[in-house]
Amino acid sequence: MGRVAVVGAGMTRFVRRAQETGKELAWEAAREALASCELALDRVDAVCLTSAPDAFDGVHMKGEYLSDGAGAFGKPFIRTYVGGGSGVFTAIQAYSTVASGMADVVLAVAEEKMSSTQPHPQGAFLTIFDNLLERPLGPNLLWIFALEMNRYMHAYGLDKRDIAQVAVKNRRNAADHPAALLGDADITVEDVLASETLAWPVQRLDVSPISDGAVALVVASEEAAKDITEAPVWIQGVGWNLDTAYWTNRDLVFPEYVANAARSAYAMAGVTEPRKQIHIAEPYDPFDYKELHHLEGLLLFDKGKAPEAVRDGVLNRDGDLPSCPSGGLLGVGNPIAAAGLMKVAELFWQLRGEAGARQVPGTPERGVAQAWGDLMQVGTVVVMGRDGGPMRTASAPPTPPRATPGRSLSEAEFRGAVGAVEDALGAEYAWDAGVGIGRFLDGLEAGEIFGRACRRCERVLVPPRMFCERCFRATDGWVQVEGTGVVETFSICHVRWDMQPLDQPEIPAVIAIDGSDGGFLHKLGEVAAEDVSIGMAVEAVWRPEEERTGSILDIEYFRPRMAGTSETAPPQGEAT
Amino acid sequence: MIEKIARPDEVRRIDGDLPIRHRYTPGLAGEAFFIALRDLGVLLGSRCQACEYTYVPARSFCERCFAELSPDVEVGPGGQLVSFTIAFVDADGDPLETPETFGLVRLDGADAVMLHRVLDPPDEGPLEVGERVEVVVKPDAERTGSILDIEGFRVVEE
């Protein structure tokens, strides 16, 4: 199998609301990528495209809709989609398409136009929560991240200041990126810590903004690459890996799925000591803590040690391991799929010495780009390097983007655009509970909590599942557990999913139900926010029997366990 | 063994939706098309000289060769009916009071075809593929910058 290289890259500006359609954004980025290596569209053999949920652009079969802007007319075309991990994954897809021998030159294109979604793109994401067990709680997508961030901070006793330093570094780096939405050379940690609290510990400036934009790469076989450029950047290794679909059951402290993906990519690339052999990192940073989380998952820092690295300047552009020299999602912007591919493009520009004011010093040989997505459970990783080839500092073209005819629309222009149309899909669903959850809801109506036991894995699963995703056997039987547990992590959420303020903050929590394995999402009540702590013992507060409907809301909330009831009841064993 | 539920009406279900709507803006070429339609009552296309192909409505780029295009070619108002369908039911499958005819038309000067209503199909015999049609645009005062500023295509006598 021959080597595969990136030989060209292009991107649009990332903006809040692009004047361009999604097709026009894709075309601008793809045309720019081709121009950067002086190729015409007819040299492209196949097109790999990615874009996050169809619901963002509001176009069903969005990949096919975008195909003309991606240069796919009359060509083999494939859209892959792994949520937030999509951008890096489409580079992997392009790699595979070339490495398989099916194409010599592939365009990899990533586009997102999130501004179409009203009132907030989060609405399109609500169904990633379990429709029966989680969505009735009125979740905000931020819960998942806030709960993970709190657990990560708790596990290592981290200071929010160290985490906020990531947001500062990236927004400062982005001040040197001509395509950036949120570059700010003067931002300070105090600015981040003073920003609005959305879902504690997540504050406004800990988060990357919703954006529109597109990025494209030209990926070529070894023979074609050498014909196209004197300075190809080789894709040395790729990897991806999924964690369990049950997000409350994951290790919220260490992203093992990222580590698994990184191990695959490093093995392919011959990287045995990542910290020494990787010179630039572009970890996925939709939230500041995620960059640290992912640097640890990428095996570049020991567990819990990435925060020290950002505090000590190791991750700065002139540090020992520059991380997100582009400015990342926090600084450049977060048009979901495009943001991931932007990271791969950044490695390309950095390793060729073409990153202009963002250029890391020295002669970096190798970099790693990573993204994260699906149901917050996929890690996608690409390792790229020059294989000893030259940087092209002397003949470096201008830093991207060279051409973006469009511009960001103001609110008034967005509302007043001639020809604009507003529409609601109007899709309504009726989700079946299925076998396991149906029985679970029957139990809640009766004031009982049932799980299923997997004897081989020695786990009790609450809520119950009829099969065990680890050993892939049918689970073995019903187990009744008590309505008591321990707070694994919690958040104090101040906004609804559409980012409108809540009258009263809510306290979502992942609760480990006594006698079961893995967490359970619910809310806490009868407790002041400042009195909640990780490890706190809690108990279910049931709705009056006559008000129960067989819903997760038959448990109103969990409250701190009262004195005198702290005995943990053992599971009652097999029930009928 | 997985337990089977014998009575489907006993299955627990929960109703829900995707609580979003979308605002579609027309983009670079699209906005030029709608402004020309609203203000001048004309249909703008884009011609790719290299591919010898004229798109309508106007586009920003040629999907065949990736060249940048300008929305600067006026097409129509005459054209030829490429195909048509007569709808007797609406999107939900319910009968329409009056059947509606929709046609694909290649406007004079264009290569791409356009979809719109066919107005008042002729009484004296069935509509035929290949017939000459022309665009009917709403009066100046009624145009807002919408595809519905076009009333539809009307069959014309040759």
Image: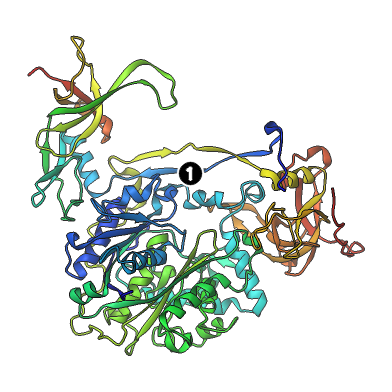
Q: Position of residue A129 (x, y in %)?
A: 59, 52
Say if A116 sits above or below A323 in the image: above
Element under disc 1: loop
Horizontally, is A462 left or right of B52 in the view?
A: right
What residue is drawn where x is 41% and y is 80%? A269
* Labels in figure, total: 1
Residue A232 percent coordinates (x, y)? 26, 78
Q: Nearer the viewer, residue A514 or A476?
A: A476
Above or below residue A301? Residue A529 is above
Q: Which residue is mark 1?
A: B20
Q: Residue at x 11, y 38 (%)?
A: B74
Which chain is home to disc 1?
B
Give residue A140's quadrant in the image.
bottom right
- Mark 1 Cα-neighbour bin, 10 Å: few <14, some 14–19, many ≥20: many
State left or right for residue A261 relative to residue A228: right
In the image, residue B10 lies at what x, y percent?
Answer: 71, 34
